[in-house]
Image: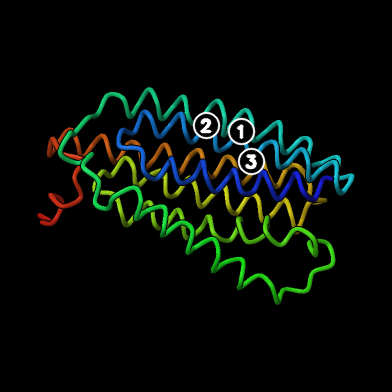
Amino acid sequence: MNDLMMNNLAGLLVITSYFVVIARQARTASWLYACQSFVLVLLFVVIADHYDASDLYLWSMTAFISKVVLLPTILYIQLGKMRDAAAEKPVFHPALIAVFVAVISLTCLYIIQPVALPMVATLKPVLAVSLAHFFIGLLCIITQRNILKQLFGYCLMENGSSLMLALVAHRAPHLLEIGITIDAIFAVIVMVILARLIFRRLNTLDVKQLTVLKG
């Protein structure tokens, strides 16, 4: 039963990631990212129950505070102060993005099949989703003109790495997850600061306008 629940939650993780990618406004993406992270927290809880890994319950609490509450709130408040309608125009149609996400997910599932790890023998779809999130995050970065939306690509990559770590190293100390979370929070804060500096100086969030470097 746990295997089925984990695989279903992994599928929901991909769906929520897709909505993060296609969201036009950064504020909308921040709430969708909170929903995506909440699904990740549920996965942590089910994995903890499946493997009887008590440390993962602590991981899930840390992830809930940082990924579901803290980071989305920071992003919602800070990114809401910056708006560039021209940069919000999508580069690709959402239907095409859906095709890209599906191809990435199926490709990762195919790549994962030869992996012979007894601990994840029945959870290869979840492992495939954790790998796919790196490429979905990359997709978010390269298909967005808005530099604020590109920031969420990094967040999706980080969620994917956290899921993979929970699967293959679920008995790792809670301190490890805290370290990863702190790194992610500081990385996001730095990227938000850089985005604000760019917007204040150039009054644009469109990467197509950031083509000239001046010494």
Q: Which residue is mark 2?
A: 34
Badge number at residue 30: none
Residue 55 lies, in percent from the top left, at 81, 41
Circles 3 and 1, Cβ within 8 Å, touching? The answer is yes
**Which numbered disc flags the more N-terminal residue, 2 or 3?**
2
Please tell me how many numbered marks the rendered image carries.
Answer: 3
- Colour mapping: rainbow
Up the image or down, 183 lies above or below 212; here it is above
Q: Which residue is mark 1?
A: 38
Quadrant housing residue 197: top left
Q: Secondary structure at mark 1?
A: helix
Q: Secondary structure at mark 3?
A: helix
Distance (Cα) linking label 2 and label 1: 6 Å
Q: Of the residues shown, which amino acid type is indicated by label 1? A: Phe
Q: Would residue 173 be seen by someone viewing this image from the given angle?
A: yes
Query: How many residues crowd around disc 1 within 10 Å: few (fewer than 14), some, or many (20 or more)?
Result: some
Residue 109 lies, in percent from the top left, at 61, 66
Q: Would residue 215 be seen by someone viewing this image from the given angle?
A: no
Distance (Cα) linking label 2 and label 3: 10 Å
Circles 2 and 3, Cβ within 8 Å, touching? The answer is no
Q: Residue furthest right?
A: 52
Distance (Cα) linking label 3 and label 1: 5 Å
* Left or right: where 32 falls relative to 28: right
Q: Of the residues shown, which amino acid type is indicated by label 2? A: Ala
Query: How many residues crowd around disc 3 within 10 Å: few (fewer than 14), some, or many (20 or more)?
Result: many
Query: How many residues crowd around disc 2 within 10 Å: few (fewer than 14), some, or many (20 or more)?
Result: many
